[in-house]
Image (cartoon, helix red, strand yellow):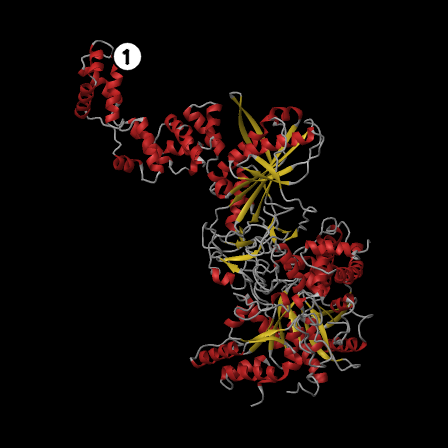
Amino acid sequence: MSEPALVAFDDAVTSFDPVIGLEVHVELATASKMFCGCSTQFGGEPNSQTCPVCLGLPGSLPVVNAGAVEAAVRLGLALHCTIAASSTFARKNYFYPDMPKNFQTTQYDQPICVDGYLDVDVPVDGSVRRFRVEIERAHLEEDTGKSLHVGGATGRIHGADYSLVDYNRAGIPLLEIVTRPVEGAGALAPLVARQYVTELRAIVQAIGISDALMHQGSLRCDANVSLRATPTAALGTRTETKNINSLRSIERAVRYEICRQAAVLSGGGRIVQETRHWHEDTGLTTSGRTKEEAEDYRYFPEPDLAPLTPDAAWVASVGASLPELPQETRARVRQEWGLDDLELTQLTNAGVLDLVVATVAAGAPPAAARKWWLGELARLANEAGVEPDALGVAPHQVARVVALVDTGALTEALARQVVAGVLAGEGDPDEVVAARGLAVVNDDDALLAAVDEAVAAHPDVADKVRAGKVSAVGVIVGAVMKQTRGQANAARVRELALDRLGAADIE
Amino acid sequence: MAAFTAEEVRRLAGLARIGLSESDAEHLAGELDVIVDAVAQVATVATDDVVPTSHPVPLADRERADVVTPGLTAEAALSGAPQVAEGRFRVPQILDED
Amino acid sequence: MSTPLTQSAQALAEQIAAGDRSAVEVATAFLDRIEEVDGAVHAFLHVDRGGALAAAAAVDAARARGEDLGPLAGVPVAVKDVLATAGMPTTAGSRILAGWVPPYDATVVTRLREAGLVILGKTNMDEFAMGSSTEHSAFGPTYNPWDLARTPGGSGGGSAAALAAFEAPLALGTDTGGSIRQPAAVTATVGAKPTYGGVSRYGLIALASSLDQVGPCARTVADAALLHAVIAGHDPRDSTSLPSPVPPVVQASTATDLAGLRVGVVSELSGDGYQPGVLARFDEAVAGLEARGASVHEVSCPHFGYALAAYYLILPSEASSNLARFDGVRFGYRAGVEPGHTVEEMMTATRGEGFGPEVVRRIVLGTYALSAGYYDQYYGKAQKVRTLVQRDFATAFDTVDVLVSPTTPTTAFLLGEKLADPLAMYLNDVATIPANLAGVPALSVPVGLAGEDGLPVGLQVMAPVLRDDLLYRLGAVVEADAVARHGVSLPGPGVLDV
């Protein structure tokens, strides 16, 4: 398949006005499933976490999980939604092997949360622009089972392709959050999309309803993109892109779709309303299998379930019990740490604000915590292809490393080795230091011995230093550092070396 | 109202994943014509001012606590399966991937 | 001692508790009876001799230990094959479930077991409970013990026939549009549809979720009440199950008078289309009520005439969705698969081969009624008619306590008589459907035989939501009157003599 022609992004957003919409599914971290008491634990033996209900056996009936309802209310309130006085469930009918009943029990015309918003801050030219993404609805539904596709080459009668289905995941509660079309973002659309999901994820994690890890599938994002000639024209035909598995991919996928659609439209073509598949490796979207006709889901009210009518006083108490939300956290740390908009946005963009806050809570100074998470740890996460929170080093461990550097027990370089050790699973920072013997050598006697060795090994350099070329002492210091495997306190070595050689430090 | 065609019946049977022979589809079209004609009379009394009732006896907020309760063993879950492989339900190839 | 076969369930329970008979002896008698006559009746799809005898022995052992036995302990019961029974095949009368053995029990089945009832086996039914004659069973019809050339009604013809042929003293049925009451009427047995939500549907293979109810079937009103009390009550596994206490049905079934009761005769459920002999027995029974202290009034329920149409939109719509799970993936029949076939092709072939024509008809109809562009016109409007039917009941119950009508327009019809025209079959339910739409409880009690053909006639009584007790109060008195007037109705001489 040849890659289609693309219009350059800058040209695309000049010629057209992009409109985006996002549908995010959050897998709730309840103990049991949406409509039955089966465990939601990840990684169980296939089909060992099932029952007549989530298997869709004849005669089974669903019963709503109160914990899932509360989670939905928590998120709705955090997104400034109205919690519906009465919401109902509906059946969405279609056939697929990973759907035990061949209908999904979801919410259709009366969802539990409506009309909310999420403010999203996007860095632009050194400052920050705020976009208000309107949230049309959030509703409860159930996840499907998982299929594995097995099979070999085509054209063979034996060893034909087949699929294997595991229903452990079937029935796990999902919360689907749907935005209204996001207009007016222009060239910032890809970034707004990414920022929205980043912020939504932060909220979901803060209120504790889900791990919301994209790489594990507990947060899924589909992006809708359409173009129109001008900001006042009618909305164009939109495509829906699936298989977006990271925050970065959201930005890339939206960007790609804008370019692709611009190319189609510029060439006089029409956008096909379809579902497209994002490919992380090649950086493009491909058309989903075209169906002869749009799926007719034949929604109707779920007769087996009663409406949800959450009591207003209870809803208010849920709202009162919400923890500090990311926006509030940002306002607070901005004030407490004296950050400007851009610095703050850096933290949230990198998805590390919570990590930094936790690291500060564990005792690190804000500046050091920020430096580590935006610097070395972000780099390591990028290399490993994971989000910083999935890296494998915890905020309290980072705080410990910072403390060790502060007291001089570690140099910056040694600290990076300690972090590597923690990541390699060698234990807590102190354990790594002990096991690897990474402590900075501060013992003057040991250092002097090393200095003498180095001086003896470099007599000509020693002469230069004695003669007044102070900068040459760097060679001595370097030799000592090498000999001590970087664990000497370099500044102290320099002092001792100069002193030994009878030179004053004029630098 | 429009008469049922065999084509329409085939389309509906397709949505319902029911294989029908051509003659079955034609025969069914005739039967459905008669039935739908008879049931269409609901329109005469079901005016706009009447609200629909989906649940005969009104209930609300029937929920269960979020606790894990015993279910089926994998063996019991798979016990009725026409084909099993690797502890999973085996089916012919699924062409359309989400 | 006389044969246990003709004893009431209540009498059997008392005899077992008193030690006059053992539960094993009773179970054996019925199991033997089944072997003797079911070749001709075909009420049963599966008989569990071993399980039944074991359950009976357990009751005898409990009695020997001096334990308190429940009011129906040791009494045999047949279960309509639409209810899940762990370890016992459950087919819903369909080829698509042939050989399926559920890994769990329906809640009502659990309650039967816990009450010490002895499950004899599973009874025949129209496939997925769609029908009024049991002719749509994939495993062959059931024959009416009153005349083996006739149907025993449906969809629960097996349960009713088992009672009428003395193969069981009790049975469980299910009623979506009359599937308990109509067979009861045409076999001279008693059958009740409880208030919607009064009995758990967990484990009931769903047909139309907003209409289905499990109910008791017996030969006497008192027996039906006892069985009703065993199975009814809130079930947390069924979100549509009512949290209210079970109405006092057993006590009501001991009533001997109707002082103060206002009885309404539904004017729309009479006249044209109703067999004269049916109306004669009905009118006679109603006339007798006044002598027992009731006042009788004519009541109009103007929207009942639209109930059939609404039902044949709501039911197929819900059924088309409920039956989607039968696809050959997780359980039941799977069509043979050629190499290279997709799962879609497998599902389509499985359902095409596994479903009978009536099921296909209703699924396609339901798919149509729910489809885009047609929902408002068909399903949406049908749900409005439901509202109107509910209002009719509410208005009626402002002036009367119960409503009565003939249960069915005709007596038992001949096998094959109504198969050619689906609409003709549907018309059998015209009197029973309104109660399902509104969710109100209803019961059918025998009131004698029609003059022109000597076949059973049933009277239907309907009561307000959660007033199931009124069914049994009126039913008990009507039953006593009918027996006084005509004697106990029994099938004529022949292979089914007891």
Q: Residue C459 at what x, y percent from top left?
A: 72, 74
Tell which residue pokes out farthest to the top in this image: A467
Q: Quadrant of the C terminus of chain C?
A: bottom right
Mark 1 = which residue? A507
Q: Is residue A92 visible?
A: yes
Q: Is residue C219 visible?
A: no
- At horizontal 26% and vertical 18% (from top left) the residue drawn is A475
Q: Residue A504: which quarter of the image?
A: top left
Type of amino acid at the residue the image marks with label 1:
Glu
Chain under callout 1: A
Q: Quadrant of the N terminus of chain C?
A: bottom right
Q: Residue A98 at what x, y percent from top left?
A: 57, 53
Q: Residue B29: which quarter of the image?
A: bottom right
A402 up-or-down from A111: above or below: above
C320 up-or-down from A505: above or below: below
- Tell me: A334 left or right of C396: left
C494 up-or-down from C463: above or below: below
